[in-house]
Every structure is written in C-alpha cells, then in structure tokens.
Image (tube, rainbow, N blue to C red):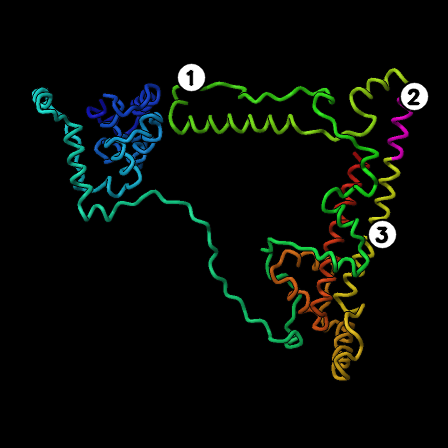
Amino acid sequence: MLFALQEDVGFGGLKTLDYINNILNAGVEINSGYYGFPLIYDLLVGTVPLKLHPSDRTHNWGRMLVRLLPSTDFAKKSAEMSALRLLADNPTIAMHQHIPKFQIDSAMNKFKGMFQGKDAVSRLLEQLHSFFIKESIRNLIKMPEVRKTFISQPQINLRPPESLSAHRLWVVPNVTDYSQSQFELDIQNCASVNIPAAQLKAFSRKPLSPINLGNFVEHLSRSQCGLPLLSGALPFDIRKNRACRTHSSESTIQRLTSDVRKYAEKTNAETIPTLIGFSPSNLESMQRSSEALHKAHSQLSSLVKALNESMYFDRKSLSNLMQRALAIATSDERSDKPYSNGMEGECNFLKFRLGQCSEREPSAWFELLVASLLSTTAEYDIRSLNPFLTSTAYKTVNSLTVVAMLTSIRISQTHRALTR
C-alpha cells in the first residue's frame, strides 16, 4: 500500500512514475484496499509525499484520482465520497493542521475492531464529522464555483459637447467603439431613396435570386447525387477500455454518440443544390449523347450571361449608393431646405461649407461610414462631423451604406460563381 512508500518513490524518480502507472492501469475504486479511499484521502491531506517534481502538490494528485473514480462510485451517496468531494474542492481545509489523519490499525487492533464494529475508516469518518461541524471549519467550506457572466469594468468617457456646432476645432473623425451587436435596416427609409423592396428581400434570403435561380439550380437528395447515407453510429468503440469507465469518460462518450447521430440525421435529410442538367445521371448521358452535351452548354451560357448582367447592374448600383451616401453625409446634397433656420442659420451653413473647402472642417469618407456601423454611438460619430446633418438624413446615410455593403457582398458572390 502507499502508506509504506520509500523516500525515493515519494519524492520522484522512475519508481514514482511506475507507481502512478500501476494506479491508472489497475483503476481507482472507493472500496479498493490498494487504490481506494485511504490512498486518495492521504493524498488530499498531504500525508503521503507522492511527487514527480519537488514542487508538486499531493492534493492535486488526490483530485486527479477523484476524477478517475467510476461513475457508480462518484454518484454514490456515501460518507467517504462526500468527504473526498469536500476536501477536493477545499484545499485550505485539506491542509488544515488539525484535520484527522488516517491511522493504520495493527494486527491486534484490527482483530479487536472486528468485534467492536469499528475499523480505521469508520473511526476516521467519525473524526471528520466532528472536525467539519466546528464553527471555525464550517466558515472555511466553499462550494464549487459557478461560472458567472463576465461584466466589463465601467469606462471613463469624456462628456461630449452639448451642441454639435460647439468646439468645432476639436472634432476628429473617429469611431467610438466596435461593440454594436444589433443591426437594423429601415425598409421605409430605403423606399424613400428608391431602393426596391425586392432587392432587400433578396439580400435577406437569396442574394442571387434576381437572376431567377430556379431556372438554373435544383435541390437533389443524397441518393440522387449518388452519395451514401451517413451512419449515425460512432466509428469506434472504446467503452471496453478501463480508462473509459469513469463518470467523466462515460458522459463524454454519450455526448459524442448523440452528436454523431444528430449530425447524420440532419445531413441525410438535407438536399444538395445542383445545377440543372448537371446531376450524376445527366453527366453520364452527356458521354453518350451530343444533344445532352449541347443542352448543358446552352444552360451554362445562359447562367454566365445572367451572372454578368447581375454583376454589371450591382457595380453600377454600388457606385451610385456610395456617392449618394457621401453626398448626404457631407451636405453636398442638402438634407434641409435653404433658410429653414433663418438668415443666421443659412450663414452658418455656408461657413461650414467654406470650412470643408479649406479643410478646416472634417469630411466623412465611405470607409468611415462602414466602420461606424459597428459603433454603439454611430449617429453621434457621423453627425459630429456635420452639425447640419439631421437625424432623418443620418438614417438615410446609414441605409445607403448598409445596402452598399450588401451589394458589395453580392458582387463577390457573383464573381466567385463566375471564376470557380
């Protein structure tokens, strides 16, 4: 037993490594006379100096063996298991100077204990009970920590000016933060700047739907594509291995089994988008029939033509969207009526426009508009550059920028479809 370890085993060396391998190969059980409760308890309280490195803590070896207990022992409601759980989660109590130590009975005392109904383990559990109920020890007991949601520390933010027209020399184009998590697109606002609702619907579902994808793509099952159904069983079985009989290993295997089964069910039920006329059966017919090959060529030509027309339209739309967004953001296209704020307001507006021409006033650029979408204070970031940009006008700029980004993504999709 470990209680008779020699110094060379207790403080490192190959003998210690061999002993640890013997523990792992034989398995750990609560009722084992060799690798059971007495061994784990002595490791947790530091009685046995089992170390591979002088800086090792025996408490960590004890916690590891607790994790390797069979699921039946770990889930069992017993005084031994409760004591091991408590000491494993509370190293301060395990290393307490007054914690009871395991005392091995001599042959005569063990014989007497058989008639008195008390052995070394029973006596230790009684002493532990008296030790744990002490007020000073109860205050040290800590239950396992539950992971809490991280809350960021409060930040110090400088107070912005009360008016966007104040302190203009201090205005610098920037994005306050990049922590925006919710993005909205005002459909009615898009309609006011002549963005078709059909385009927005396509962006939200199938960006390439304007080319009538139904004329070029069909959805086939795995069998129609000549693919076998996926098996829902694990491709390996390691449950007979001793290391896989612990409670943590069994839960991991159950999770893997469930994940593989669900993945197979989902994949087998899915359909695979395929170009019309290019299914496995169609490809076989092309080898035998020139008519089938000509039909497939015509189909591809129609698809390439539709994609090129879509890309030409999108590139032209992207240019218009970018120019319109910048024009409104910089007041090249006014968002208010002239003299709506009187003569003084109109003079201030003309001063601002002259300041832009002389570069005394900052002007927005399209990359800044795109980056501001990620800011929680996007409206303030952009309107601070132009104090004459109304809230309604900013919403228009935001809508134009978002639609321009979606159009750019569709151009990339079209380009990838044409080049691959």
As for residue 233 lying within the magenta part, the answer is: no
Q: Gap in Å between the C-alphas at discs 2 and 3? A: 38 Å
- Specify whether residue 49 is in view: no
Mark 1 residue type: Lys
Which residues, given as a range, are shown in magenta? 290-302
Position of 305 with respect to 144 (left or right) is: right
Q: Gap in Å between the C-alphas at discs 1 and 3? A: 65 Å
- Of residues 311 and 4, the one nearer the viewer is 311
Quadrant of residue 21 within the rendered picture = top left
- Which secondary structure dominates the residues rendered in magenta? helix
Mark closer to the observer (2, 1):
2
Mark closer to the observer (2, 3):
2
Q: Residue 292: horizontal and vertical position, in percent?
A: 89, 22
Tell me which residue sits at (65%, 27%) in the image. 269
Q: Is residue 275 above or below residue 382?
A: above
Question: In this figure, which residue is indicated by the disc labeled 3?
Answer: 316
Tell me which residue sits at (42%, 27%) in the image. 249
Q: Please give the label number shown on residue 291.
A: 2
Mark 2 residue type: Glu
Which quarter shows the N terminus?
top left
Position of 381 with respect to 206 (left or right) is: left
Q: Residue 277: horizontal and vertical position, in percent?
A: 83, 26
Q: Are marks 2 and 3 in contact (CB under 8 Å)?
A: no
Q: Please give the label number shown on residue 240.
A: 1
Mark before the other along the chain sequence, 1 or 3: 1
Q: Residue 143: horizontal and vertical position, in percent?
A: 31, 44
Q: Gap in Å between the C-alphas at discs 2 and 1? A: 59 Å
Tell me which residue sits at (18%, 48%) in the image. 135
Which quarter shows the C terminus?
top right
Q: Residue 158: horizontal and vertical position, in percent?
A: 54, 69
Packing grade of label 3 (10 A; few <14, some 14-19, many >=20) is few
